Every structure is written in structure tokens, then in C-alpha cells.
Image (cartoon, rainbow, N blue to C red):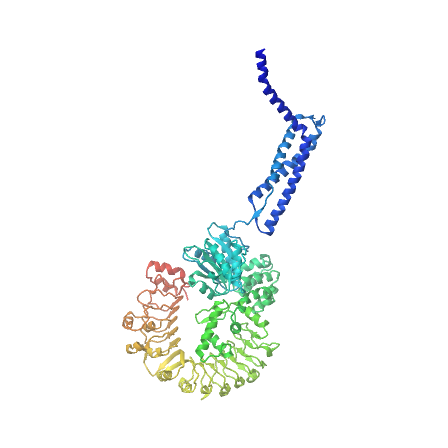
Amino acid sequence: MGNIFSISLSLDPIINRCWDCATGQASYICNLEDNLHAFKNEVEELKAIRSDLMSKVRIAEDEQQLKRLDQVGLWLSRAETFLINDADQLIVQSPQHVEKLCMGGCCSRHPRSTHKFGKQIDGILQEVKDLKGKGDFSDVASKPPLPSATERPSEPTVGLESNFNKVWSCLQKEQVGIIGIYGLGGVGKTTLLNQINNKFHDTTHDYHVIWAVASQDRPIERVQEQIAERIGLSNNGWKSIDEKAADIFNVLRKKKFALLLDDIWERFDLTRAGVPLPTQGNGSKVIFTTRRRDVCCQMQPNMDNNIRVECLPPGEAFKLFEEKVGSETLRMHPDICKLAEAVVDECAGLPLALVTIGRAMASMKTPPEWEYAIEVLRQSAASVFPGVGKEMYPKLKFSYDCLPNERFRSCFLYCSLYPEDHPIEKDQLVDCWIGEGLLDEHTNLRNARNQGHYIIGSLIDACLLEKGPSNDSVKMHDVIRDMALWIAGESEKEKFFVKSGVQLKEQPKANKWEEVIRISLMDNQIESLYEILACPNLQTLFLGRNHLEVIISDFFNFMPMLRVLDLSHNSNLRKLSAGIAKLVSLEHLNLSSTGIRKLPVELKALKELKYLNLEWTNHLEMIPQQLISSFSKLQVLKMEGCDCDCSLVLEEMKHLKYLNVLTITFRSASELEKALVFNKFFSCAIEHATLQHFRGSRSLNIFDLANWQHLKSLILLGCMDLEVKIESNVVEGAGCFHSLRFLYLDDCNQLRDASWVIFAPLLQQLLINGCKNLEVVISEEKLREVTKYKANTNLFSKLEVLNLYFLPKMKTIYCHPLPFPQLEKIKILGCRMLKKLPLNSNSAKGKRLVIVGREEWWNDLEWEDEFTRIAFLPSFKSRDL
């Protein structure tokens, strides 16, 4: 019995557990309907909570630009999993399991599957309850962490690769903190800055990149707002620039940043804006774009770190144009592709013009349409194209609008009178401005000229003018010129009639001559002017570089306001009409390089004349007596290359108390002596002088000419018997040719050397031709003799062009190699004994040196060393003249 009792006691716990298990298992079946009902309710509530939470998240993300919290994202993800993958599926399956229930829901006809389903419902019900309990969030989103760089939209670019590489290379230099990108409006500066920004976005770096656009109005405040937003500063109730700057500074000084600052128009004060100045210590960078070169200099004085974005070369320009016009259009007719090249030429490589005109031409499918478009472009009437007058020109005009005042704007518009691609001599341009009264009233001509050159520099800085082929000239980009003519056409004050360089053969016609204030017909093929122009408001008339033979006497009858008249470079014009005397307001008269044989005495009526140019009038035989002295207001008299007797003119000059500038040719020692004496008593500055076929002396002390302190150009022409000397007793007191830029020696057979050029420290062009006995340019022996005086021992430091022609005895230029830091071109012809150029490895550093010479001379040329030979071989342009 004891044994049996003992066994009974030990079975009770097992039986109890089995009972509990059986009843528990049964509860999944018995409670299935109740659990399903509760489950559906909980799921509906979970969906409602999820929907409300998603609404809050969308508002935070879309409207407040916040980032959802990670825990919120995780909760929504779990809720999505339960609702889509689990809950909804179970609810769909539930009817078939309920149908299997029997005996009032306490049993199932398929107990195993019903039990399993009931267990699933019970388990997920608890999870749904837990998920609901965790779905109550006080905050659903927060400010996102700031990315190192934000990608900016950018179209594919053409031709900016080299500029991009320059900028990116500068960024890698520790010592470079500020980089300027400048250039013409529409040339691609902002596009380049976009590329820099997106390069930061696509690469690994430790910079915090900030993009900001300046504005003409409130530039500092505008940039501060963009920086504050980028670095996560909210508006803290700032009342002043300084308060905002302090907060910006406190954030940025702890970061290594790259500020990309687009489109600044004046020096941007980084410190006042709160931007720490980039240093090697903080490693930060500032890259900015501007249309103004002077702004670059103010922001970054080292111009090596300022990069000019140039217009596209022809190949890349055509590629960009093709992208915009469409290759299908170019293939519509065999002639269109060739015509497209002419259109691209008219755009002169400016991306904005190529894009705008390319889009406008995309619908033109026949050659006649393209031919008409080319004619329109050549007539500077591009505004008829869709988008040009409304999009392109206004964008470019902003540079014009930002010029300091109306004087600068009028001077800029004046430049459009010259033909496309025409180099404009700076002095000639300024003298025209003075003649028309565009500059301030000055006490003397030099101050007026200085103001004119200042304005030219400002226009270059604004990228509205470009440097010309020489330092003494400028040029105007074709599209900028078209824009200037468009402005003049739209203006009520600046009415132009410009048909320069368009191959006119006859005098043109216009509808309203009475409104025109400036006319330019220069650089055409007009032979005669027979029709009278009634132009009561005309102030400038350019007729230069035509084929003029006849101008009727009455042509000038109705131009009472005319102040500037240019008839230059009309070699067939033999006679000047007496009717020119009607121009009672004329101040500027240019007759240079005409075929005029004598000046009419009626010119005495021009009482306001201040500028008279008779240069290179090789046929001018007679100037009436007392004519020159009658121009009592004359300030500039140019007579270099004039064939008349300058002795008589020099006598009359004594009566010209306002004469400031003189250019002249001397043909005898007596004429030169008279000028030297004249110069001692008068303030007149001789700027250009020629000694031609010099008579009366076989010797010239070159330092007699050094007294002409403003001498810019000196020509010795055909002085076959003249020996040029340097007299030491004169050298000590003579100083240097401080202003001399151009020297031309031609057929001077007594010259053995030209060593005195060491006293011209700023010489830019040296041309020597046909001097049969010249052996060396600078003699080392003579150099030793004169260096104890005030000579320039830094030889040829400013020389840009060196031309040596037909010098049969020349053996060397100088015995030792020199750096020639500014040298751009050497041309050698007929110098068979010259076997060595005085170049060293530093010559023309940073420039492309062009060396031109015949093949046989080039092959015999000796180099200073192998390194120099290799350095210059790739740089020459041609071996054959």
C-alpha cells in the first residue's frame, strides 16, 4: 500500500501540468472568436495611430524641412510589417478558421490547424498592443545633420575643363586661401562654380561647403542669410549685421569651410559678414566669381590665384552651338553646317550667345534662313532673334548698368563705333572722347588723358573691353559690341548710325538723320559722298578706312554740332573740300594717311580746333602760312611722316600757347636743332619722332633726344650715313628714355650696335631692318663702359616683340642668355650669321613664346643648353615666314 501511495503522489504534478497544457491549448480554440474581435479592433487602432503619425512626419519633412527621428522611422517600419505582412493576412484567413469551430466554439473540426491559427492570433495580438503602446511620440522629427556639400543642378558643360583644373589645383595649395574667377558676362563663371560645388559633393573631403549668391542690393545681408541657413543658424532676433556676423563667426571658426560666393560686384568684406579669413592654419577656402577684374585684385592681390574664364575656341564653340541647335537641323541640308560655322564665328566664343542664338536657330531648316541670319548678325542686329533682346542682352547689360555713372557708360558705347575685331588705339580713343566732350573739363590735356585711360582701365576691369594685340590698344568682344549698339538703339539720348566694316560701296541712307548723334561708316569701300546729310545733332563722324576720292563741298553744310571728324586712311582722297569750314564746332580733325596735297586756307574758320592729325600724309606739299598758328586752341598736333617742311611749322608753333603734344619727322640736323631749342622754352611734349634721310650731320648724340621725357616712339629711317653715339659727358645728366616703348631702326648702315637701348628700361618693341653693318644689338664692351651711369642693367625686362630683318653681319643679340620675362614673339629673317638666341630657361616664363624663322635658319640654330632647346621647341609657331 505504501508503495502504491508513493507512486500516486509522484504522478500528481505531471497530471496537473498535462491538464494545464490541455486546457491552455484548448483556450486558443475556445477564445479564437473573442481574440479575433479584439485583434481587429487593435489593428484598426494601430492603423489610425500610424496614419496620424505619418501625417505629422510628412508635415515635418515637407513643410518644415526636418528629418524624421530614427525611432519614429523604426516604429513605422514595424507597424508597416505587422499591418501588411502579418495582421491583414491573418484577418483574411480568419473566416475559414471560424467556420471550423463547433460545439459553441469550444471545439474544432480540425483542432490542429485551428489551434495553430488561434496561437498566431494570440501572439500577434500582444505584439500589436505593445506596438500601440510605443507609438506615442512627443517629437517625430528634428533638424537633419548638415551635409558637407549640397549638389546643385548643372547642365553638361563645354570647354571649361582647363579652367576647372586650374581652380581645383589652386584649392589643393595650402598657401592659397582666396581664389577669384572673373570674366565677361555669359562666359560661364557660375557654371564653373557649380562644377566646383558638385565636385565637393561627389568626393570625400573635410570641408563644409557653403554656396551663396551676392546681390547689388545689400550684398552682406544677403550672403549672411544664406550662410546662416547653411550652417543651421535660426533667426535669433538679430538687429544688425554685426550681431549676425558674431554668430556666424562663432560657428565657422570651428569648421574647415569652403565658401563659394557667386557674382560679387565690389570688394566683399568677409570679416564684416562674419566669415573668418582663410589661412593655412584653418585650411578654409573662399572661391568667388565676378565680372570685374579690379574686384579680383581687391579680394586677392596675387593675380596668379585669380583665373580668367575666356571665351571658347572655335572647335569647342561649334560643339556647344551644335548641342543647342541640334544635329538634326545641321543635317537638313549639306550647306547648313558650313553656314553654321559662320554663325558661330559671329558669336565669338561667348557661351551665352552660342546657347541663345543656337536655340533661336534650331527651327531654321533651309540655307536661305541661315544666310539671312548671318547677315543680321553681321549687321549687329541680333536682337531680332528670339531670346536675344529679352534674355541675352539684358544679362550682359547688367555690367553696363553697374558702371559708375553716365560718363563711363557713354565712353563705353562710343567704342561700338569701331568695326568688329578692330583694335582701338587707346590714345586715339581718349582723344576722340576729349573732342566730343565726354570727359571732365581739365586744366591741361595730360589730366584729361589720364582720366580717359582710367576709364579704359575701368572698362577692362568690368570685362566690357579687352586688351588688344598690344599694350597700347583695346578691343571689344563682338557680342558686347552688339549689345552696346542695342543699348544705343533703345536709348533716347544715344542715337547711333553704325555701318562700320560691312563692305558698303555707296553712301547709305537713313530715315531720321536729324536724331543721330554719332555716325560710323569706317572700314568700308565708299568712294564718294555726294548726298548732303542734314544732321543737326551729329557730334562724331567716322569715315576712315574707305576708298574716298570725292566729298562734295556742301556735304558738311548741316552739321553745326560736329566735334569729331575722322577721314584717316583714305589714300585716294587728294583734296579736302573748302566746305569743311562750315564745321564751326569741330574740335578733333584726323586726316592721317590720306592723299591730301594741300590744306585749304578756309580751315582757319575752325576756331575751336584742339586736335589736328596730319601723320603720314606723304603727299602733303603745302600748308598755308599762318594756318597752324590760327588754331589758337590747338592742344595736339600730329605731323610724323608728313611731307611738308617742318621748319615753317615749328616757327608757327611758337604762337600755340596750349600745345601739349607733338609728333614730328626731322629730315635735317637744322630741323632737329630747332626742335631741341623749341623744347627748352615750351611745355609741348614730343611723343613720337622720326629721323628720316637725315641731312646736315653724320653724327647724332642719342641723348639729345632723351630730353624729350614723353617720347614713346622713335624711328630712324633711311639714315644711311648717320652714326649714333653715346657721349658720356651727356649721359650723366641725361637720365634715360623713361617713356620709350617702340624703337624702329631701318637702313641705318653706320650702326654697329644699338647698345644705347639699355637706357630705355620700358622698351616693349624693338624692330631692326636692313642695317647692313650691325653686328650686335648690345655690345658687352659698351655695356661695361656705360653701366657706371644710370643705365638699365636689367636688360629687356619689358620687351615683348623682337624683329630682326636682313642683318647680314649680325652674329649675336647679346653675348649672355637673358630671362626676357615679357617676351612673346621673335621674328628672324635674313640674319644668316645669327646662330644663337640669348634665351635661358626662364625666358618668357608663363607665356607662350612664338619664334618665327625660315626652316634652314631654324635647323642651324644653337641653344644655350639641351634644357632650353627642349623648353622652346614646342613653343614656336612657324619655321617659315
Q: Position of residue 741 (x, y in %)?
A: 39, 73
Front-lying residue, 328 or 807: 328
The residue at the far bottom in this view is 625
- Name the image quarter holding the C terminus: bottom left
- Name the image quarter holding the N terminus: top right
The residue at the far top in this view is 1
Q: Position of residue 781 (x, y in %)?
A: 27, 70
Q: Position of residue 625 (x, y in %)?
A: 45, 89
The quadrant holding residue 742 is bottom left
> In this image, 222 relative to 856: left or right?
right
The quadrant holding residue 32 is top right
The residue at 49%/66% (across/down) is: 463
Front-lying residue, 581 or 139: 139
The residue at 65%/42% (across/down) is: 48
Residue 722 visible here: no
Residue 47 visible here: yes
Q: Position of residue 49 (x, y in %)?
A: 64, 42
Q: How many marks?
A: 0
Q: Is residue 655 above or below residue 60?
A: below
> In this image, 610 relative to 9: left or right?
left
